[in-house]
Image (spheres, rainbow, N blue to C red):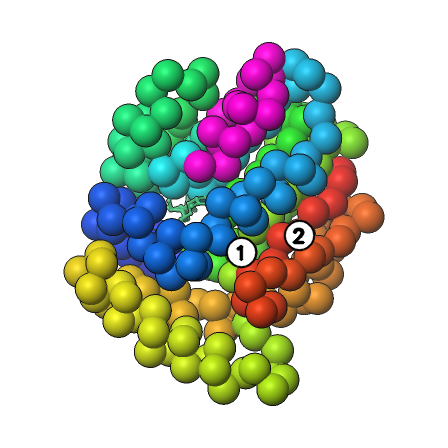
Amino acid sequence: MNVSKAASVQKMFDAIAGQYDLMNRVMTMGQDQRWRRFVVSRIDIPEQGRVLDLATGTGDIAALLAEEYPKGHISGGDFSQHMLHFAKKRFADTAIDWQACDANHLPFGDNIFDGVTFGYLLRNVDDVPRVLKEIHRVLKPGGTIVSLDTTPPARNILYPFISAYLRYGIPILGRMIASDEAAYSYLTGSTMGFYTADELAAAFTSAGFKTVQYQKFMCGTIAVHWGVK
Ligand SMILES: C[S@@+](CC[C@H](N)C(=O)[O-])C[C@H]1O[C@@H](n2cnc3c(N)ncnc32)[C@H](O)[C@@H]1O
């Protein structure tokens, strides 16, 4: 990853960590946990399996995994120390192995995990194919990858309304709730410029994943992709 982009993304998440959860709930109108539950429902691992929730942020997906697999080994990894600080605080009573790590160079051996999940990671990295290959490396053969991310809205009848919400509504909410309009303008820009859901599915396949599928939510602005190594 380009050092300056990695550094600015890390700095941005460090800065908004305290308001991150509230902002998520408000801007998704309370839908965000439903998508994370869908992510967890796509994972199918043995009772005592190992799952890595990468870009875990404040830990919501990792905590849902721990709830679903109480005998499993759940790791939550992120390169923002402030986001991890809130994750550890929020889920202090949950057995999750929190790790500071960069998705470009995972500090794990080959074929370790039964599943790797990540919410809103790929939009933030410079080299999506490289990160997908890195995730492929740490997954066991037969292991599942599940991604949750925003996706550019389709140019249909709803497009003007969705695009106005993304361009104006979200940055205004960012200013009001997180006191950081720039971070949420970045969210809009990085969504509009991101892979379409079909392009991302093709990137999963190119990285070596099979049976790649996806489902969209929130008027087509959110997509969950999954596949198997
Ligand atoms: C929008 S937050 C998502 C947090 C969480 N997954 C959720 O569902 O709310 C994106 C997270 O990705 C992390 N991140 C971005 N690029 C990363 C990278 N290269 N390696 C590790 N974490 C990264 C950020 O620090 C941030 O915590």
Q: Residue at x 74, y 45 (%)?
A: 227
Is residue 154 visible in the rendered structure shown here? yes
Q: Quadrant of the C terminus?
A: top right
Q: Secondary structure at mark 1?
A: strand
> Residue 87 versus residue 28: which sits nearer the camera?
28
| Ligand 1 closer than 8 Å to label 2 CB | no
> Which tag, 1 or 2, sits closer to the chain's start?
1
| 113 displayed left or right of 52 | right
The label number, if any, that marks residue 28 in the structure image: none
Q: Residue furthest left?
A: 179
**What range of the chain is rendered magenta?**
60-75
Whether the magenta-drawn stretch holds residue 73 is answered as yes
* Quadrant hosting residue 128: bottom right
Is residue 151 visible in the rendered structure shown here? no
Q: Position of residue 208 (x, y in %)?
A: 75, 47
Q: Residue at x 77, y 30 (%)?
A: 141
| Ligand 1 closer than 8 Å to label 1 CB | no
Q: Residues within 10 Å of mark 1 (few under 14, many from 20)?
A: many
Do the CB atoms of the residues marked 1 and 2 lie less than 8 Å apart? yes
Q: Residue at x 69, y 47 (%)?
A: 226
Residue identified by numbered label 1: 149
Which amino acid does the dot numbered 2 rest on?
His
Q: Position of residue 13 (x, y in %)?
A: 30, 49
Q: Secondary structure at mark 2?
A: strand
**Numbered marks: total:** 2
Alpha carbon of mark 1 to alpha carbon of mark 2: how far? 9 Å
Residue identified by numbered label 2: 225
Which amino acid does the dot numbered 1 rest on?
Asp
